[in-house]
Each structure stands twice: as structure tokens, then as C-alpha cells.
Amino acid sequence: MVRPRRAVLIGLDAPIASRVYGYAVRGFLPALKRLIESGVYMENYLVPYPTVTPENWTTIATGAHIGTHGITGFWVHIPGEDIYAVRSAWNTDLCQAEYLWDAAEKVGLKSILVNWPCSYPATVKSSYQLWGTGLAPNEWRTDREKGILYVADLADGQLFSTYDIPFASKISLRKASNWVGLDPSIKSLEAELKLNHSACRKAGEIGEKRSKVRSPDRWFMLVLDTHGSGYDKVLLSKSKDLKDVFVELSPGSWSPVVVDEFLTDEGIRKGAFRCKLLELSRDGYRIRLLVTPICNLEGYSYPPGLSSEFSKVNPLAPPSHIFFDGLGWGWYDVDTYLELLEMEHRCLSDAAVYLMKNKDWNLLFMHMHAPDWMYHYAIPIEKWDPSSPWYEGEEKAKLYERVELETYKIIDNAIGRIIEAAGSDSLIIIVSDHGARAKGYEFSPVEALAEAGLITFKETEHGRIIDLDRSLAIPAHGPWIYVNLKGKYRHGVVEPSEYEKVQDKIIDALYSYTDPKTGRKPIALAIKKRDAILLGLYGDRIGDVVYAVKDDYGEHHGQLPTCEYGVGSLKGLLIISGPGIKKGVTLDRVVYATDIVPTICYLLGIPPPRNAEGSIIYSILEEESQISKMDKHIYEHMDIESPRKWALGSYQVES
Ligand SMILES: [Zn+2]
């Protein structure tokens, strides 16, 4: 049996595995179809609970359970700190397990990391890393303030409009005057475009956060009637001088990529963006102009100069959260949304292909976030899943399903480019961190615990809050309930001797609670921390009780990895193909996210990362009985330590 020389791991965030599989085998996703036909599709791939992004990508990169690596959610509570104190999970300093890319470096292998969540600050020394500070390039989540989802760098996208649209910047037109170089016989209107350089629109109560860009703070727009038959052209200029025009647009057209300098708090930075004239009425008074996020051409890489090097290949690496919001807010139509996604995935695949062709590498890790944001913001599943109480009817469902399929086609095209560049001697792994499903009913652990007398409230000038001095249990930071222990927390009230008794009371309260809206019991599972080891949850960073809600409760994901609800499912997507892997097999046995790292290590001959806990998925390997002979041959020629001792020692070998 031949073994792969390299491994390419492409992560998709929150795809619904069964839908992707269906689209692929029907021929809509040719790259994924080829991988399924030439490899193994795992239909029972279970991701860790809770089914959330940072912890699960970290498990996939380390082979370690959440309890071991300690990334317990988007926000991590560190023991010893105040009960509500958290740190952003987007920081490798918080991870307690070794990443596969670091283990690989120890035996002289190099990795390429492209947009891998929670991989910054970079831990690699001889490898290559682009982005990883957020879920998209040029997006910052590392050490951000709580309450801010992300910070776009240099600035987020902006929509200018002459009429009211949610979150758009309204502009007013007047007759153009005092323009240098403008032919006075051409009918023309003008407007000033105030650049708000928002860094984040999802900051909740604290409002928009401004980016570090200080200048320019405005552009000048000129609307022209070039043929005397109605307004048909828009120019954007840095001043009211035609010499400073940098973009010329007709209705429906995109500008080329504009690379310009911006004055920021950190000095001059180069940024890239594009503009699209979404609408221009003949009378000139109805205009919508989209400016994409302004992408920082520097930083976000290891070695530090790598992003600037790559920007010569493709400078448009947008923090793309707003692409999905934009469709949901009605900023643009489906076609523009798809054009934006195409730009993003062209950039991501350009990055992977460029680095594979120009650098020395053995492993590639990359992540594409589009399915997650699509299901959360662009086409929320509850609007088109007939099982949901928020279903909007068949006509809308058809449109949303088209968006879903076209989004997957763009992702599939990017995957196709990457696997072609990787070559036929590479192991290819397509993997997700969790699935997605329609948003369900809300469950409030606070209400359940208050009803049982475990939480007491007090009135403050900001409204009703949990009274920490009189509450026995505090829900926080994930599907966790903390026992408010004396000696552990400043406001602790529970004697250590009462710890287990209070855990029992919390569990009883959760199971007994009836949702007044539905008359149902929302809890699927509530267990003591001691028992949560069964779910890979342990250590100081999780709560004292772990709970999970039933399939039709909660958000788009976060429930048990076995959750099935309407068209959605939280099972993971896992396809493995390449030398040494069986062909055209659908595996129905259960496979876990912790198994991916050991399987890669086994096939590539890399000693496993220090904390890897999963098993090698032997059932996907060709000629399983030949494995021991094969090991000897491979490790002799790779001139590294034989894996025999770790294969049998560190790994749990499957039966
Ligand atoms: Zn995710």
C-alpha cells in the first residue's frame, strides 16, 4: 500500500453534512463528489459537545478532548478569577494541548496554516501562517473586549444609499459644483461620502466601534449623465478634482481591486477594497453603492512578512462577516452576495495554492467559515425549514435553498483548486467542527434555577440581576452551571461540604423545569462535572453541572452532536481520501473529532502531538492487515523515529 507524502485538511464551519453529501453525489459539487468516490465518507462523525467553533477546531488540531486542551467556548473562564470573568478563546496562549503543526515541526515537517481559527499568536517556528485571528482573514477576535464579536481590519464594509436601508450610510445629492476638470456641459450631481470606518457593527449596546483608520475620512462622488439620456456613471474621487478619481462605475459594475494608503493610529497602512454600484436610477436620485471591507495588507502572518508577500498575489482578503449580514439586511441581492463569496474563496484558495507551490510544506490546515455565517445571518435556517415555527413558506424556501447550494458550489470550487494543487500523493481531509439547524425555542437556565430557589435576584439601576451573595448556582460561559462555592468565589455562599448536594439540586431543577411557552421539558441531559468526563469535559474551566437542551431548543448549533432537527443536523462532515485510504466507502461506524490527528500522524509517520487522545481510524485504511509491515518500510525511509512505540503506547488502538 502506498502512503501519502503530505496531508491537506480543509475545514468547513457548520455545513449540514447530509445536505452537502446529497448535493455532491447529485453532481452539483464535483470536487467533493470526486473525494467521496475516491475515499471514505463518514456518516457518523461525532464532534465534541458543546457543538461550538473554538473548542471543536482546537480538538481537530490537537486530537485532544475539550477537557484537555481547555478551550471551552468562545469565552474561557479561568479558575480563580471572578465568576463572570472570561478571556477570548482566540488566543493560543490559552490552549493546554500541543497542536499537530507544532508536533510536526519537531520531526522537521512544515505546515501551512490558512485562516485556522484560534491559531494566533502563531506557535509555529519554521512553518507558514496566514490569518487565524478570527473566522475570516483580517478579522480580529484575539483579546477583543467582551461584547464585540469581531474587529475588521482595516475597516468593515459600508453601504451608501440615498434612501433608508438598515445600517446603511445615507447620502444626499446636490448639483455638482466647483469640480476641477469637469466639463460643465455634462449634467452632474455630487455627494460627499463620509467614511465611517466601522470595525464592528455587532457590538450590541456599546454601538459601533471605530477602526484605527483616521484618514481619509471622506470621498467625493460624482454622478454623471454622459450621453444626455439619464444618469449612467458614478465616479469616486479623493477630492473635487477629476485627477483624483480612483473608481469609475456603471450600474451593476464592480471596480477593480483598489490598493491605497490609509493613515491609521499605527501609521500609514496599505488597504485593499472594491466597490460595486448596486443601483443608479436614470434621474440620479436613487443610488446604492457598496464598498467592501478595507483589507489590511500587512500583519496577520508568520513569518511577519508573509501577508505582504501574498498580497501581491491577491490583496483582497476581506473580513467577510458583513457579506452575510448584508444579504440579511437587504443591502444587495443574491447575485452580489455570491460575487462577494466568490471573492473571499478565491482569496482563500489563492493563499493555499500560492503557499503550496512556493513553500516547502508537509501539512496544510485551512478553514472556510461561509456555511456557518450563511445559516446564521444570510439565510437563517428557521426561515426555510418547514419544521420550524418561523418557516416563511415554500417560495422563500426555494430562494434560500438556491443560496445554500450556490454557496456550497463556491466552496467546492475552492476545494477543487486546492486539491489539484496538492497533488495525487496527498491525503485530503474535508472536516467540519459541527453542523447547523433551525433556531429553536429559547431555554433560560436562570429561570429554571430561580424557580427552584437556587438563584435569587436583586434590583439595580441597570435592572434585575442575579444576586451573587444569595444565589447557590450561577449559569455562565456555556452550557455550564457553577456552584457558588465559598472560598472559590468572592461572593461564594455554598459550603464545600454541600457541593454535591447543590449539584443534585441543580440537576433536579433543570430536569423539572417546564417551558411555560410550550408546556415541555427542554432539558435533554444534565450531569455532574464528574460524569461529564464521558463527554470529554473535565478540568477547572468547565462548570460544576453540564447540561444540554433538546433538539428543538437553542440556537443554530451548540446542542448535542447527535441533534437532528428538520433539515438540519449537528453531526460533522468528514471525508478522507488519498493514498492508503479505501475508495468509495461510506463508513457507518462512529468516528470522533479526536481521531483525525492520530490518523494523519499514523499515515504520515509523525509522532502524535503530546496530548492527542483519539484513535487511528483503521477501518478507512486499505489493506489493514498490512499495517505493521508498512510501518517498518515507511519509517525506515523517512529517517525518523519508528512510530511503533507511540502507535501502541500513546494511542488508544481501536479494537
Ligand atoms: Zn463553527
Image (cartoon, helix red, strand yellow):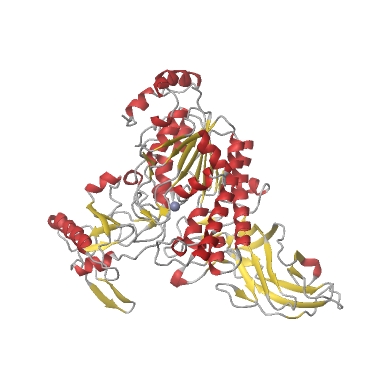
Where does residue 392 sit, x and y in percent of width and height? 47, 67
Q: Residue at x 50, y 54 (%)?
A: 371
647 vs 489: above or below: above
Left or right: residue 549 compared with residue 122: left
Residue 7 shows in this picture: no
Q: Residue furthest bottom?
A: 174
- Looking at the image, is 619 positioned above or below residue 116? above
Q: Is residue 414 above or below residue 162?
A: above
Q: What is the count of numbered marks?
A: 0
Specify whether 449 is left or right of 318.
Answer: left
Horizontal and vertical percent position of residue 285 = 70, 79
Name the outermost residue toward the front: 394
- In the image, residue 646 sits, relative to residue 224, either above or below, namely above
Query: Which quadrant of the figure contains the C terminus?
Result: top left
For the question of whether residue 525 can be seen, the reply is: yes
Between residue 89 and residue 46, name the one nearer to us: 46
Q: Nearer the viewer, residue 117 or 349?
A: 349
- Picture residue at 26% right of the left edge, 71% below the top: 516
Q: Toward which corner of the image does residue 518 lie, by quadrant?
A: bottom left
Q: Where does residue 266 sit, x and y in percent of width and height?
A: 59, 60
| Near-viewer residue (410 or 263) | 410
Furthest toward the left, the residue is 497
Q: Is residue 501 left or right of residue 614?
A: left
| 132 to the left or right of 71 | right
Q: Place residue 74 in its image quadrant.
A: bottom left
Residue 237 percent across, percent down from the top left: 74, 68
Image point 64% across, 66% down: which residue?
290
